[in-house]
Image (spheres, rainbow, N blue to C red):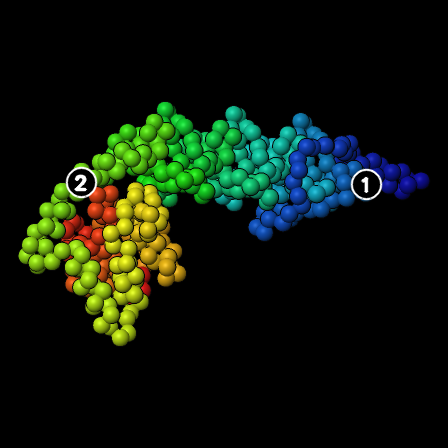
Amino acid sequence: MKTKFAAMILMIVIMISSPLSVQAAAVTGSGTTDALQYGRTVTAEKISAEGRAAAVTSAGLKNGWNYRDGNWYYVRGGRTVTGWLKDGGKWYYLSSGGAMKTGWLKDDGKWYYLTKSGAMKTGWLYDEGKWYYLSKNGAMKTGWLKDRGKWYYLTKSGAMKTGWLKDGGERYYLTKSGAMKTGWLRDGGNWYYFKANGAMKKGWIKISGKIYYMMPGGERKTGWLTLSGKKYYFDDNGVLDLNKSREADDQETAQEQAAESKSSENSGTSGNSAAAKNTQAAKSNAKKTKGEQVAEYALQFVGNPYVYGGCSLTKGTDCSGFVMLIYQHFGVSLPHYDAAIREKGTKVNSLKEARAGDIICYYGHVAIYLGDGRIVHASNSRDGIKISERADYRTIAGIRRIFN
């Protein structure tokens, strides 16, 4: 009897000294997190649980979620879990003391957000007046982001950017919704244009058959503009006025005419005799290079009209259109802008190294080299397509070779 009584007393002492059992409760959350692996070391192993209501262990401590002193804890094998926890397809984070974390969390150098239910957040998050984006693994995104076909930019702090942005030497604009802008934008009384990749456009641009000029700051130009000695006029909508620009261009021919007149006096030749000279030289070659063929083909259009913005070798074209159409005959596609042509082909270091068919690029003008220091080009509305005896009658910006 005494032995049985002593055993009962011992059992009572053991029960009193055991941890009190706590009722497990269920927590529901609105998070949309996918079950993902993080691939990193955490303070406790990631645990997949059957649910939050678990069987009572023999020690009297419930596995799963336990609510105590205003905090949630997760128990496994009689011990509280710390670090990342996967439960019911969602991720949670338990602090070093075991309490479930909510709000912002920095772990392994990355930021995460835990909702009020404790579930890790993914996708867009609005917090304290700012938008953030949490990737599929929960990490906060920075830099460029493409979501549902639109581009956004998240700053170093993770907040979504709006307004003007300078990145990688280019300027972009993010709308109020954060989406990257393309096409026309009116801001601060000025018009800007953004390419398909979102970068702000500078310089010449042609849209729906209309020509515009975007200033170095990106603003669309209106009124008069002088570029490399040539005058251009843009109406109130920024569209290039061909008639006014042509009239101004006619006034810019004096320097060219004076230079060519002096050259003709010294050589005793005229533009027409130069054309004959070129044709005879071309016929004398039994085998012509591709460049020589280009030069010979261009000569047949000498005397045809110059039309600013035109695109016909017979009815009229401008300088870049002339070069574009000549090379188009040989299967080469070139842009209808003199500045853009300067980027095509390969560089020729000097006029001495130039060959027939090379493109002589000036500031605001282009021509085709004939050899012997001469060029053929769509000069201006007064002279049309002509031969000039001096390729260096104006400053040369560069020489490009299409056929090596």
The percent coordinates of residue 123 (x first, y second) are 59, 38
Q: Which residue lies furthest to the right in this view?
A: 1
Left or right? Give the position of 57 relative to 393: right
Residue type (three-letter) at the residue carrying disc 2: Glu
Front-most of 356 and 121?
356
The percent coordinates of residue 314 (x first, y second) are 33, 51
Residue picked out by circle 1: 55
Q: Is mark 1 on a helix, strand or loop?
A: strand
Dividing the picture into quarters, in which one does residue 117 lie? top right
Residue at the image point whose x is 49% and y is 38% from the top: 152
The numbered disc on residue 42 is: none
Q: Residue furthest left?
A: 266
Residue at the image point whose x is 20% and y is 68% from the top: 281
Residue at the image point whose x is 27% and y is 50% from the top: 304
Dividing the picture into quarters, in which one does residue 89 lie? top right
Q: What element carries label 2?
A: loop
- The answer to whether one can see residue 34 in this image is yes
Residue at the image point whose x is 76% and y is 40% from the top: 51
Residue picked out by circle 2: 252
Front-most of 331 and 25?
331
Front-most of 109 and 367?
367
Q: Which of marks 1 and 2 is in front?
A: 2
The percent coordinates of residue 327 (x first, y second) are 34, 58
Front-most of 355 and 282?
282
